[in-house]
Amino acid sequence: MRALVLDGQNISLDERHPEASPPPGEALIRPRRMGVCATDLELCQGYMNMTGTLGHEFVGEVMAVGRAKDKAWIGKRVVGSINCVCGQCDMCQRGLSEHCRDRTVLGILNRDGCFADLFTLPVQNLLEVPDSVDDDHAVFVEPLAAAYQVLRQLTVEGRPFVTVLGDGRLGLLCAQVLTELNATVRLVGKHPEKLELCEKWGVKNRLLNDVGLRGDQDIVVDCTGRADGLTTAMQMVRPKGTIVLKTTVSGNHPIGPVDLSPLVINEIQVIGSRCGPFPEALDALAAQKVDVLSLISRRMKLTDGVAALQTAKQPGVLKVLLEP
Ligand SMILES: [Zn+2]
Ligand SMILES: [Zn+2]
C-alpha cells in the first residue's frame, strides 16, 4: 500500500509500504479524506523526533476489525480520537486517559498515521459519523475538537475580553468556537485575507500591527504556531489574566530565551491545551455551528502528499485536504 513516511529527516511516498493489519481491539480504516495540519509540518522539522507514517486528521471507512466481537464497525464511516491509551496506568486510572503514560498517538508518537491507503486505530477511539455530516466537514472533527478544548478549560466570569492570537487554521476555528462564550471575542492576525473570513462570520478582528499591546485582555489564546507567540500574548494579557497555549513548536526554531518574568510579575495563569472532545465537535458540525468549508484551500491526492505538505506551508494557505 501507499504511505507518506517520515524517516527522521525526509518525507517521501512509499508505494510498497507493508500492508496495515488490525491487532485485537483495533480497526483497519481506509481514509476518505485526510487533513494536513501544522503539527505535521512541525513533525517534519523534527518535533517529537517522529518517524513513520504521518497524519492524524481523517474521516474514513472501517474495512476490517482485529476481533470478531467488533465486527459491527465494519462498513461504518468514522472519525477517531488520536490518543491510544493503556487503561492501566495511574493517569488512565484517574480518568485522565488522554494523558496516559503509555499512550501512542496517531501519526505523532509511536503509531503510524493516516496518510496511507490503510491504517489502524483502536475501536474504542472511533465515533460513527452521521449521514448529515459529509466527508468535507467530518475531516475537521480533530482540529475542531482541539478548539472546543479551550472552551472546556476556561471558566468565565462577567463578560471578559478574549483575544485569539493567530489567524491560521486553528485560530480561525478557535475564534468561531469561543463566540459560544459570554465574552467579547476578537481574532488578531497578520493576514487581511484570512481576517476577512471573520467578517463573514461576524467575529471581531484586527491586524496585529494595528493593535496596541496594552495588557488589557482578560484571556489570550495563542494559536500562532510560533515560538514568539507567548511573548506577544504576555504583552496583551492583563495582570491576573489567563493565557491559553495551543502552540507546539519543534525545538529546531531558535528564538533565544523567552523572558517569562511577566508571568510572575503580573500573576498570569497559563493553561496548556491539546486535544479535545470529539463528540462536541461532531455535534457542532451536525448543527452547522461552525464554518469549516471556507478553510479548505486545496484538495490533493495522497500520491502528491509530499507536495501537499509543501503547499500547506505556503503563506495564505489554510487547510489542505488529501484524498485517496
Ligand atoms: Zn492536527
Ligand atoms: Zn494509561
Image: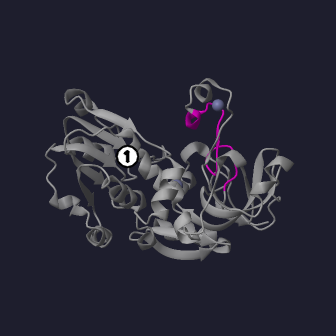
Judge whether residue 163 is colored magenta: no
- Residue 276 coordinates in the image, percent (x, y): 49, 46
Mark 1 nearby-residue class (10 Å; few <14, some 14–19, many ≥20): some
- Residue 193 coordinates in the image, percent (x, y): 31, 73
In the rendered view, tell whether residue 199 sits above or below residue 174. below
Most distant residue in the right direction: 68
Q: Along the horizontal axis of the image, is 279 left or right of 233? A: right
Where is residue 263, by image quadrant? top left
- Tell me the quarter of the image containing the C terminus: bottom right
The type of residue carrying mark 1 is Leu
The residue sitting at 48% across, 67% down in the picture is 319
Q: How many marks?
A: 1
In the rendered view, tell whether residue 102 sits above or below residue 135. above
- Tell me the quarter of the image containing the N terminus: bottom right
Where is residue 100, by image quadrant? top right
The residue sitting at 23% across, 28% down in the picture is 267
Question: Would residue 61 be seen by someone viewing this image from the given angle?
Answer: yes
Q: Give the structural element (helix, strand or loop) at label 1.
A: helix
Q: Nearer the viewer, residue 298 or 11?
A: 298
Q: Along the horizontal axis of the image, is 132 left or right of 77? A: left
Where is residue 113, by image quadrant? bottom right
The residue beneath circle 1 is: 151
In the rendered view, tell whether residue 284 sits above or below residue 214. below
Q: Nearer the viewer, residue 311 or 280?
A: 280
Magenta residues, dominant SS class: loop
- Residue 91 coordinates in the image, percent (x, y): 58, 27
Judge whether residue 100 is colored magenta: yes
Look at the image and give the residue range highlighted in magenta: 97-113
Question: Would residue 42 be seen by someone viewing this image from the given angle?
Answer: no
Q: Nearer the viewer, residue 77 or 22?
A: 77
Q: Nearer the viewer, residue 129 or 102?
A: 129
